[in-house]
């Protein structure tokens, strides 16, 4: 069974850092492009970042550029999002999603990040 | 960051046809394909339509998509109670950003 399981969310103070993980199983992880998408409470979806399957091409939304870093470890079937200099507006459920060009056939269940003092 | 504009709400009675619009620009919908997602309350989004008008396996043919110029549409025919959800369009932008629509809540009356 194909699965994406996010972890690492929690409460963090403004200016703090957090690292999200997304563990994949049931498919050949290295064959797929991956993304992070977030959703603030009661709000719409926002694409955050993209990483290619093997050559580590990455893209970021302007709202997180310079603060967030996407990475992957294909040997561990894992995707990561290092989030630094966190702000209140980064409070959201963060989903990992499989695919490219915003065609996401498969999503994780999400992990909640709350930025608050 | 650019966004795709959708009406905030749409509604219909069971069996009716509902259409949701998605307005973009020449930097996103105008040059790239459009995808649609359905999000039921408390769950992750689900891909409903990709490449403007393609349905993933398992998506009923009541759902259809189209694109013209810098706009796209999602149609739900034969509306059912389980279609009550939030719907989002999405497209890649030539600024190397992914862009989602503002979202439309569909209510079945």
Image (tube, rainbow, N blue to C red):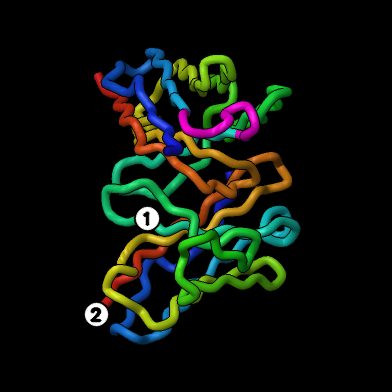
- In this view, the residue in front, B91 or B23, is B91
B64 vs B29, left or right, is left
Residue at the spot x=69%, y=23% of the render?
Answer: A56
Residue B80 within the segment the image draws in magenta? no
**Contact (CB < 8 A) between labels 1 and 2?**
no
Asked which secondary structure carries label 2, the reply is loop
Q: Residues within 10 Å of mark 1 (few under 14, many from 20)?
A: many
Residue B109: assigned label: 2
Nearer to the camera, A89 or A61 = A61
Per the image, the residue denoted by label 1 is: B39
Q: Position of residue A2 (x, y in %)?
A: 45, 38
**Left or right, A5 with reference to B47:** left
State the image coordinates of residue B56 (x, y, percent, origin top left).
54, 59
For the residues beneath circles 1 and 2, the answer to whether they share a chain is yes
Q: Is residue A22 above or below residue B20?
A: above
What span is in magenta?
A25-33
Q: Secondary structure at mark 1?
A: strand
Q: Which mark is residue B82?
A: none
Residue found 59% across the figure and 47% down from its top: A102
Q: Is residue B80 above or below residue B29?
A: below
Left or right: A47 in relation to A87: right
């Amino acid at each position: 069974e194909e699965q994406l399981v996010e972890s690492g969310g929690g409460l963090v103070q403004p200016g703090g850092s957090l690292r999200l993980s997304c563990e994949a199983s049931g498919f050949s992880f290295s064959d797929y492009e991956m993304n992070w998408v977030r959703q603030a409470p009661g709000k719409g979806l926002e694409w955050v970042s993209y990483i290619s399957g093997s050559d580590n091409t990455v893209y970021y939304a302007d709202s997180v550029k310079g603060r967030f870093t996407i990475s992957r470890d294909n040997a561990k079937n894992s995707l990561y999002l290092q989030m630094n200099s966190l702000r209140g507006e980064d409070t959201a459920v963060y989903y990992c999603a499989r695919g490219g060009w915003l065609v996401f056939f498969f999503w994780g269940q999400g992990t909640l990040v709350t930025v608050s003092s | 960051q650019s966004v795709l504009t959708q009406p905030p709400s749409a509604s219909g009675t069971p069996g009716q046809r509902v259409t949701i619009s998605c307005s973009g620009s020449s930097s996103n919908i105008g040059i790239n394909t459009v995808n649609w997602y359905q999000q039921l309350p408390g769950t992750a989004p689900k891909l409903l339509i990709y490449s403007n008008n393609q349905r993933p396996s398992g998506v009923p043919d009541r759902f259809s998509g189209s694109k013209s110029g810098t706009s796209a549409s999602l149609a739900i025919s034969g509306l059912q109670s389980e279609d009550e959800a939030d719907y989002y369009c999405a497209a890649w932008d030539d600024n190397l950003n992914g862009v989602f629509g503002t979202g439309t809540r569909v209510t079945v009356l």
